[in-house]
Amino acid sequence: MNDERYVPAAGHHALTRFYDPVMAATMRERTFRAALVREAVTAGPLTILDVGCGTGSQSIALADAAPHAQITAVDGDPDALARARARSAGRPIAWTDALAQDLPLEDDAMDCVTASLLLHHLSPSTRLLALREMRRVLRPGGRLHIADWGRPQDPAMRLAFLAIRALDGRQNTADHAAGRIPQIIRDAGFTDVRTTGRLRTVLGTLELLEAT
Ligand SMILES: C[S@@+](CC[C@H](N)C(=O)[O-])C[C@H]1O[C@@H](n2cnc3c(N)ncnc32)[C@H](O)[C@@H]1O
């Protein structure tokens, strides 16, 4: 048992029901989700793991773009998972209640792992454990695709990012604000780490990253 705070989708459990409308209003959601899906499905993966799937928007977009892939979607919040399941309208996604730092999956089981807006919910030590778990379940040559907050591009983005930092935790978001996430992904054992896109949003600079 540790005393680390579990940070749910919208920062507090009572706010989870507002998560989807706030995302739609603030995050250029269609643009970043489509970009992440495009990058993740290019190589035609047969097995995809979406970690920290929350209310399911990214997992559902992946399932629609790769209808023949087996998709496993993991989150540690049963309320978010129930919302995801209810929205998934029969899509064959394996919604799984588990923690990112302790994935209930075999080594080398996945062709592709995605995590959108998960990493800034984790403390630095848990984030490293979670990334190592993602690496463990990826087959050799498998690809990691991340969408998460990056170093703000300018003072306006730095100001915008203060709201997320207050809601989700200053400690959890410090590496994002400092632009250290690519190096942390390398530290977890990934290679070929690349930033593939940067988007200005109402809440800060969103980065797309990929790695092998
Ligand atoms: C901001 S939401 C992102 C949800 C979704 N990926 C998306 O793009 O909309 C972050 C999610 O991470 C989940 N989460 C936080 N800590 C976690 C952990 N240790 N293991 C698994 N999920 C976690 C939360 O429950 C929440 O649903």
Image (cartoon, rainbow, N blue to C red):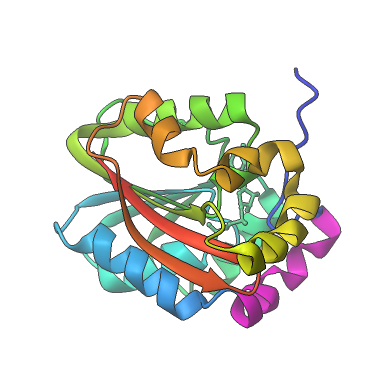
Q: Residue at x 26, y 62 (%)?
A: 39
Q: Nearer the viewer, residue 69 or 127?
A: 127
Q: Is residue 203 visible?
A: yes
Q: Is residue 58 left or right of residue 63?
A: right
Specify whether 33 is left or right of 11: left
For residue 5, which quarter of the picture? top right
Identify the residue shown where x is 60% and y is 79%.
Answer: 24
Q: Nearer the viewer, residue 29 or 52?
A: 29
Quadrant of the rendered structure where residue 163 is?
A: bottom right
Given residues 133 and 87, the one toward you in this image is 133
The span shown in magenta is: 13-26
**Residue 9 is drawn in which quadrant?**
bottom right
Residue 59 drawn in magenta: no
On the image, the x and y values in percent for residue 81 come to 61, 56
Residue 13, x across and y down, in percent = 81, 54
Where is 130 relative to 64, above or below? above
Given the current orientation, which residue lies at the most extreme right position? 14
Q: Against 132, is 1 above or below?
A: above
> Is residue 102 visible to the viewer in this orientation of the structure?
no
